[in-house]
Image: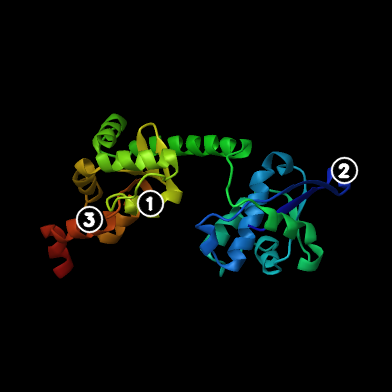
Amino acid sequence: MGSCIVHIFPNGDEKLISHAARPLTSAEASYSQIEREAAALIFAVKKFHRMIFGPKFLLLTDHKLLLAIFGSKKGIPIYTANRLQRWALTFMMYDFDIKYISTNEFGFVEVLSRLSNTKTNLDEDNVIASTIFEYDFKSNLLDTINTLPINFKMIQQATSNCKILQAVIKNLASRWKYPISPQISPYYARREGLAAVDGCIMFKDCIIISACFQKRILRQLHRGHPGIDKMKTVARCHVYWPVIDEDITSFVHQCHACASAAVS
């Protein structure tokens, strides 16, 4: 990943405080060039959050297009890709200016980029971020549980009895060092959004439901016969399993009331 340099302005005077760099993850390596450059800026503000949150600071980039996205005073451009829009919302927390600097004048950053170790170490900042990340997941977990026809203990017990979900939890703890079987490959494909919380698994803001409770969840989602699209929309706010969209479609197609309404 492109390295980052952070400047702050104490009492109006510019002062260089730190350098940082890290390699791209396997997922980030597939990003477009502008997304990789933007990811470097996101890495910078997260890395130095404790130093820059509050005082005004300066972001330097050698990718001029980012000025229009993150430096616009008129809001986020509507044509911006979803990932860049999410990152732009993160930048709204900070008081900063963003400035273009040519690559030829960015020599110290280029050196850090090329000296970055390909192995990312778990440092203090990562541990802090993980703690906050888990806290957010617990909050979302409790919010989600309150909307379901089953309680937390039931989901926790079902997860502990499910060999597939236990294999996922084991791989999450080991950073996916164990063999990936066909049964857990759908979870591996979504590993960036997974987290184990109190014996359950979350995918982003949704709790993963084991097979024994999936029919019950489908019946709850289907109350009032809202239709396929509405069921999927509600499900994506609360629950997840790898083939949930297909299961919702099949469930609605088997409903005589929905089929009659569709014909009429």
Q: Nearer the viewer, residue 179 or 148?
A: 179
Q: How far across and how far down the image is residue 232, in percent?
A: 31, 56
Q: Which mark is residue 188?
A: 1
**Residue 86: quadrant of the picture:** bottom right
Check disc 3 and report the residue beneath it.
Answer: 247
Q: Nearer the viewer, residue 21 or 158?
A: 21
Mark 3 to mark 1 CA distance (whole Å): 20 Å
Residues packed near mark 3 inside 10 Å, few (<14), some (14 to 19) or many (20 plus): some
Q: How far across and how far down the image is residue 38, in percent?
A: 63, 60
Q: How far across and how far down the image is residue 220, in percent?
A: 23, 45
Asked which secondary structure carries label 3, the reply is: helix
Q: Hey, what amino acid is under mark 1?
A: Tyr
Residues packed near mark 2 inside 10 Å, few (<14), some (14 to 19) or many (20 plus): few
- Of the residues tagged 3 and 1, which is closer to the observer? 1
Q: Is residue 104 visible?
A: yes
Q: Hey, what amino acid is under mark 2?
A: Asn
Q: Is residue 176 above or below residue 29?
A: above
The quadrant in which the C terminus is found is bottom left
Mark 1 to mark 2 CA distance (whole Å): 48 Å
Asked which secondary structure carries label 1, the reply is: helix
Outermost residue to the top: 153
Q: Which mark is residue 11?
A: 2
Sequence-wise, the earlier of marks 3 and 1 is: 1
Residue that appears at 78% across and 65% down: 101
Sequence-wise, the earlier of marks 2 and 3 is: 2
Q: Nearer the viewer, residue 138 or 186?
A: 186
Residue that appears at 13% across and 58% down: 254
Q: Is mark 2 in CB contact (under 8 Å) with mark 3?
A: no
Residue that appears at 35% across and 50% down: 187
